[in-house]
Image: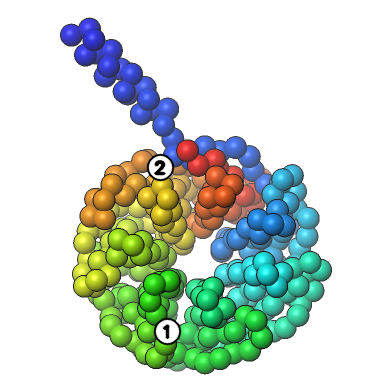
Amino acid sequence: MFITMLVLFVLRAQSADTVPLKLVTTYDFPSDVDGKFDHLIVDLNGHRLFTTPHKSVDVFDLDTGKLIHRITGVEVPHALLYRQDLQRLYVTDGEPGALKIFDGKTYDLIKTVKLLPDADAIAYDPVTKYLYIYNGGKDAQHTYSTISIVDTTTGEKVDDIKVDGDQLECMVLETSGPRLYVNNRAKNQVEVIDRNTRQVLASWPVTLGKGNDPIALDEPNHRLFVICRSGQLVVFNTENGKEVQAFPVGEFVDDLVFDAKSKRLYAPSGVAGSVDVYEQTDPDHYRSLGKVSTGEWGKTGRLVPELNRYFVPVPKNGTNNAKVMVYQVD
């Protein structure tokens, strides 16, 4: 009996000490940074973190955690891409409806690609160097939405794909084939688009949650992860387009990461002020590793496996300045 109780105590102690994310530092913004953040990215070679407060892209030194530059001339920055080979930063600007391309060394504006209002979510194809950008929809007073294709090498728009429904959200593309998965929040479904023909192949209804937004893909296991703002993470089988199951997350998650190596999912909730971490035990089963506190409206996050770090920007709250919470991944 004593040995059994001791084993149980050790197991419980180990479980209590096992935290998937541990806060190691914070990067502080100046007091003039207010409002919610959108997405962020890391330039590993340049040791920089790019963040998206309102009306600018703020750049931090990863080593010192200090703000080193503020890129102005952006009204409502949403999504970011950094091409290391060209040393260029690509920013979707929602208010004017544009993709803005900056020099990664000088931070000077190189080019503006005119799009429709509400230029927002992106997906990048590293083979063709094409960037897929959601824009238009209800902000352009259209009953349909537009996915514009921009060649990031030339900075020219290649084509537009029209999708029925006035509000699209996040996108993810597969690498082994031509499919692009897009969350159509207007219709509460996932659109499957062929990147070669630029046509919608199928529409998969989301029935296990409402307000589908962030999306991630486990391509080898044929699983698509869709987060609904109502507080569900829905798992799809991409071979048949069927929902496999759903499990709870916090409300208003605006980012989702699936780390193929660790088989973990990270879902930061703006309402809950925490990150839900799940582990995939097999393609049909997932277990919660717990919630990690971040801060109110910390709704986006960036996992950087090379640094073993997870970054969450948190808005200003009262007398507390906005900051980026930096977590060690365990």
Front residue of this view, candidates 165 and 87? 87
Q: Earlier in the sequence, mark 2 or mark 1?
A: 1
> In the rendered image, is residue 145 in sight?
no
> In the rendered image, is residue 51 in sight?
yes
The amino acid sitting under disc 2 is Lys
Residue at x 48% of width, y 85% of height = 147
Residue at x 21% of width, y 61% of height = 244
| Disc on res. 195 | 1
Front residue of this view, candidates 175 and 216? 175
Residue, far top: 2
Q: Which residue is mark 2?
A: 291
Quadrant, the N terminus: top left
* Rendered location of residue 245, percent (x, y): 22, 59
**Would you call the spot at circle 2 few (<14 residues within 10 Å), some (14-19), or many (20 or more)?**
many
The amino acid sitting under disc 1 is Arg
* Rendered location of residue 51, percent (x, y): 64, 60
* Rendered location of residue 66, percent (x, y): 75, 48
Q: Name the image quarter holding residue 60.
A: bottom right
Front residue of this view, candidates 115 and 223? 223
Left/right placement of residue 12 relative to residue 20 reads left
- Work out whether 305 lies above or below 109: above
- Work out whether 119 lies above or below 256: below
